[in-house]
Amino acid sequence: YFTDRETPLAACRELIGALFDKKAIAAGRSCWVEKTPSNLLKISFLKELYPDAIFIHINRDPRAVVYSLLKQSWAPDNIVDAANFMRGTYEKWLWLRNDLPPSTLNNYHEVKLEDLISNPDEVLNSLVIKCGLSPYETSGLDLVKTAIKSYMGGDMTNADAIDRKLNTWKFALPMEDVELLNQTYGKIVEAMGYRLPGSTIAEAIGYESTEKPMNHGSSGKSWLDKLSGLIR
């Protein structure tokens, strides 16, 4: 119902500003962070909405993510349904990632959770540079490092301890469930830069798909899904 696309986009910015900007200003901050995971699937719309927005994607082994769902009251409580619950989301993201334009990639940064845990200073300092943040805007980094240290119980250098903390699924799940995850998420695991049994993959590789993935994962819609759906 609009003669140009910028009009509804401006209305969206005004609505989001009313919800988030006032909170940031009241807290004495110059920016805010929205961390709903599924909003990653709306990165193109977010880039259009906020051309200068910065996107930081913290990766975790998909198998660990599926295992963590088993502990959530809102998610499936068995490994088969939990695996199917997330697969569509991963497939859609990998399909979208392959087609991100350079203008979006310039403001998009991926970080492995394992790297953040084992070397927070290097990872965070690298993000500060990439994001062009000022010293004032990085005053909260010590809080991040303190939270990481607390999460790890103070042990942030032992690779085995980090692996056991972040990948409990390896040690807690029956072998048949581990094999199910490896089979269900094989190409996805590799595309996210993680290893399958017998694999030597160390970096993320391309995820080839000739067809747009079906939406057969998590069906809940975030506020951003609903907002972007109003603009066609």
Image: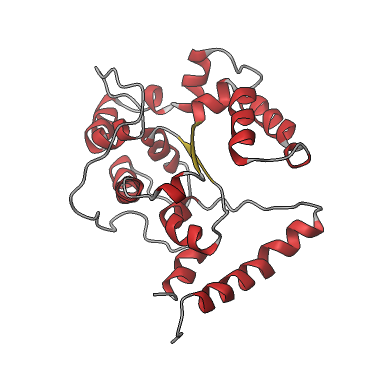
Residue sitting at 68 percent across and 40 percent down? Answer: 133
Q: Tell me the quarter of the image containing the C terminus.
A: bottom left
Residue sitting at 52 percent across and 53 percent down? Answer: 36
The quarter of the picture where residue 141 lies is top right
Is any part of residue 152 visible from this angle? no
Image location of residue 116, percent across then percent down: 56, 28
Residue sitting at 66 percent across and 67 percent down? Answer: 17
Q: Nearer the viewer, residue 48 or 190?
A: 48
Q: Nearer the viewer, residue 78 or 104?
A: 104
Extreme residue in the front direction? 103
Extreme residue in the left direction? 210
67 versus 229 height, above or below = above
Along the horizontal axis of the image, is 135 left or right of 75?
right
Along the horizontal axis of the image, is 176 left or right of 37?
left
Image location of residue 45, percent across then percent down: 45, 62
124 versus 16 height, above or below = above
Q: Tell me the quarter of the image containing the N terminus.
A: bottom left
97 versus 124 height, above or below = below
The quarter of the picture where residue 126 lies is top right
Is any part of residue 29 visible from this angle? yes
The quarter of the picture where residue 51 lies is bottom right
Image location of residue 131, percent across then percent down: 61, 41
Image location of residue 215, percent across then percent down: 29, 58
Q: Which of 82 and 215 is in front in this view?
A: 215
Residue sitting at 30 percent across and 30 percent down? Answer: 190
State the colouring used for the structure image: secondary structure
